[in-house]
Image (cartoon, grey):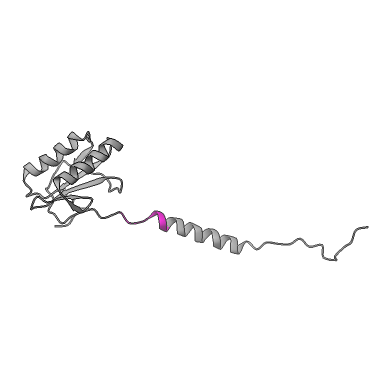
Amino acid sequence: MAISSGDDDQAEVSMSPLIDCVFLLLIFFLVSTMSKKENKDIEISLPVSSSAEKLLPSNKIIVIGVDIKNNLFFEGVPVTLNALHLKLREIGVVDPNQRIRLDADEKTSMRRVVEVLDLCQFNHLSNVGIRTYDEHYNKR
């Protein structure tokens, strides 16, 4: 014998809390993926080039800097030539195709720029580019 509770209506689930939850998750993922690019730049005056290839900024690129006083920087942190050589050696072993960007002041001696480029070449890093002034990204 079947017992009836007298209420044959099906239980309903309200969709509005579910939709609110989905929108909150969507907003969270959008905000978390649009994080700011790391600032690895140093205060230098970049050389001007009329034929430079324009590339989008990336956090995956390694930045080596040389300021007007010929001081070296690795990812925005001051380093010595020997410390830079050790870091580039580690990178060359792990990923020889790693992109490297050289930021050198326009008045930096060519000798220092060549030293950095030689270090990259010595450590089998050939994907090296030199950053130049771009009116959209830089202001003088």
* Magenta extent: 31-37
Q: Where is residue 108 in the image (x, y as percent from the top left)?
A: 8, 48
Q: Which residue is drawn at 26% across and 40% down?
A: 90
Instruction: Please tell me whether residue 96 is drawn above or below residue 131 in the rendered image.
Output: above
Query: How many numbered markers are drawn?
Result: 0
Quadrant where the N terminus lies? bottom right
Q: Is residue 131 visible?
A: no
Q: Residue at x 18, y 55 (%)?
A: 42
Q: Where is residue 4 in the image (x, y as percent from the top left)?
A: 87, 63
Looking at the picture, tell me which residue is in the foreground, 137 or 33.
33
Quadrant where the C terminus lies? bottom left
Instruction: Please tell me whether residue 27 is drawn above or below residue 128 in the rendered image.
Output: below
* Left or right for 14, reference 10: left
* Left or right for 93, reference 46: right
* Left or right for 109, reference 98: left
Q: Residue at x 27, y 45 (%)?
A: 61
Instruction: Please tell me whether residue 24 is drawn above or below residue 116 in the rendered image.
Output: below
Tell me, yes or no, whether the highlighted magenta stretch contains residue 34: yes
Looking at the picture, tell me which residue is in the foreground, 68 or 24.
68
Looking at the picture, tell me which residue is in the foreground, 10 or 106.
106
Q: Position of residue 135 (x, y in %)?
A: 18, 52
- Seen as rendered, the residue at the extreme bottom is 6
Q: Can residue 56 be seen in this view?
A: yes
Tell me, yes or no, whether the highlighted magenta stretch contains residue 129: no
Q: Where is residue 2 in the image (x, y as percent from the top left)?
A: 90, 58
